[in-house]
Amino acid sequence: MKLSIEIAQTILNGFDRHYRLFRATSAKAKERYENADWVGARKASQERIEMYDERVAESVTAVTERFPGAGREETLWPIIKRAYIDLLYEHKQPECAETFFNSVSRRVIDHRYHRNEYMFGRPSVSTEHLDGTEPTYRCYYPRNDELRGTFFAILKSFELKNDFQNLRRDLDWLARAVAERFPRGWERNPNFQIQVLRSLFFRNKAAYIVGRVLNGTNIVPFIVPLLQDNAGRVYADTLLVDPQNIGRIFSLGRAYFMVDMEVPSAYVAFLQSLVPSKPQAEFYTMVGLQKQGKTLFFRDLSHHIKHSSDAFILAPGTKGMVMLVFTLPSFPYVFKVIRDWFSPPKDTDRKQVEACYQYVKKHDRVGRMADTLEYAHVAFPLKRFDHTLVEELRKLAPSTVEIDGDQIVIEHLYTERRLIPLDVYLRDANHVQLRDAIRDYGNALKDLAGADVFPGDLLLKNFGITRYGRVVFYDYDELCPLTECRFRSMPKARNDDDEMASEPWYSVDSRDVFPEQFPTFLFPAGKAREIFLQEHKDLADPLAWAAQQTRLREGVMEDIFPYAQEIRFSRRYGPVRYYKE
């Protein structure tokens, strides 16, 4: 066997081992759900994120130990790549295998050879019409407008071991929700059918049925969340058909799904038909294949740079003391570079900042923390960088930035969706927008607390607002587990000297937090502070924070829904009754 084929096979063996383990972990999510093993589900989610790098490290070791000269023989790698392509014939995950090849080769050969000739800058194997040994989705053909029978078949097709709490009621509620959404019914075309992905989508304490209705040229997406009661009985919580709600389910501000996929590209193609505005990169990331998401994001960025002409500039908003943030106005993302030094009062270092971002990557983000993609050694065209931005990078992050001919090379950066900084948004907000944003800011703090996260720095500039008006936290350098904080009441002054002292006269530990200061610290006197106290007076009460800490320490896992409470069946049609049929 030729050396190039042996190396290619070694790398592909590493990927195949990775995907076997990835898929086994994802498939076991069904068992964890049936057993209500929420702690195990969260642990598995965290461990799965680490799998990829572990398998890459194993493959790098296998290549360098079995073929000691591979890293020095750069001219061999185009031949290895061609041999690798041949091995991907009839492969079920070729696009992910190409990304794995890139990850291994980047660690073996010099970065000067990171071109399409040596690695997969572009895909070489088409995934269009690729399918597995079983169809990716099931098809149902209702014969009339009565959908109860179809919903019954769908719910039973996943073969959950749990009893249904009240299946007859759930079928009635699903049919009623459809009738309300389509009060005039619909004219059926010959191709009318309901398609449902074969695997449930598991996240936190929910399992999601994901499907679509095809009728002529129209596609209507739908999602049915399945929850459990305290006895482990399953019930349909709602029917999601609104595009905004569907998009929120697949938000990168949440933990990644566990999905059993033989052919991930087929799942992603299905999902993109539901939310066409979301790029493939985000769907790959949401089903746990974040490295493939990174690859596709970078290809999208490269394509956009080539077909645009605006300049990268410093991002609008208050400058950070830890991160230097820049953006390309025509591209809806920001890029964040860790500064070489931090101005007081920041008391941290690069290692701690990187650890915080890794913590967020593995943690349940509950829709309130922006997911980030991390890149190393990224080259941008220098002519596309605003002069002021270049000077800021050189001044604040000289160890990370290098000018190499007509390129500016950044050794390490993060990227995430661009949001409107909350402090900027509130400056121009009308009364309704002001109240809604401040209400959701408080809700964000409570959601994060329910996930054992305390932002540390609660200033509004560290939060952003999405196009749907949702408040999201994005500055992680002071983040810590809520259970590690100590929430205290403000000590009462002993005398006039204490009252007039410029510095606290009482001892303060780094873990101490004084919630009573939040209203005055976060908002100037006026309407915004009044709204905060009206909506979230409890956030200024140390006892409320301490009570949440107690719940976390007792192992309580909060129910945090990716859709509004008002659209749950129990709210719309009546309370959930805990009885068997």
Image (tube, grey):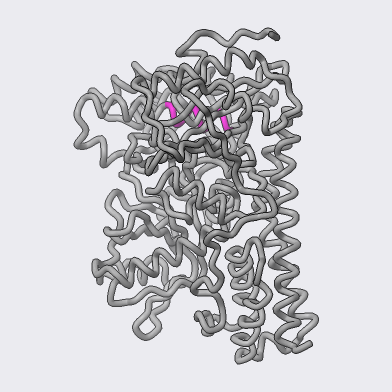
Whether residue 445 is in magenta: the answer is: yes
How many numbered marks appear? Answer: 0
Quadrant position of the N terminus in the picture:
bottom right
Residue 208 coordinates in the image, percent (x, y): 58, 33
Q: Residue at x 30, y 61 (%)?
A: 328
Along the viewing direction, whichever of 147 and 504 lies nearer the viewer: 147
Say above or below: 133 vs 160: below
Q: Which is more toward the observer, 61 or 301?
A: 301
- Residue 379 spot, x, y in % from top left: 42, 75
Give coordinates of residue 313: x percent, y percent.
Answer: 28, 63
Q: Is residue 533 left or right of residue 132?
A: left
Q: Residue at x 56, y 78 (%)?
A: 119
Point out the image quarter for the C terminus: top right
Q: Is residue 507 left or right of residue 91?
A: left
Q: Is residue 292 magenta?
A: no
Q: Residue at x 37, y 20 (%)?
A: 496
Look at the picture and state if 98 lies above or below 234. below
Quarter of the image for residue 537 reads top left
The image position of residue 253, as x and y in percent, is: 48, 42
Residue 452 occupies quadrant: top right
Left or right of 332? Residue 552 is: right
Q: Is residue 571 visible?
A: yes
Residue 496 lies, with reference to residue 300, above or below; the image says above
Image height of 229 relative to 78, above or below: above
Report the predominant secondary structure element of the magenta stretch.
helix
Viewer-nearest residue: 80 or 437: 80
Residue at 60% over, 40% down: 138
Q: Which residues are magenta?
A: 443-451
Is residue 493 visible in the rendered image? The answer is no
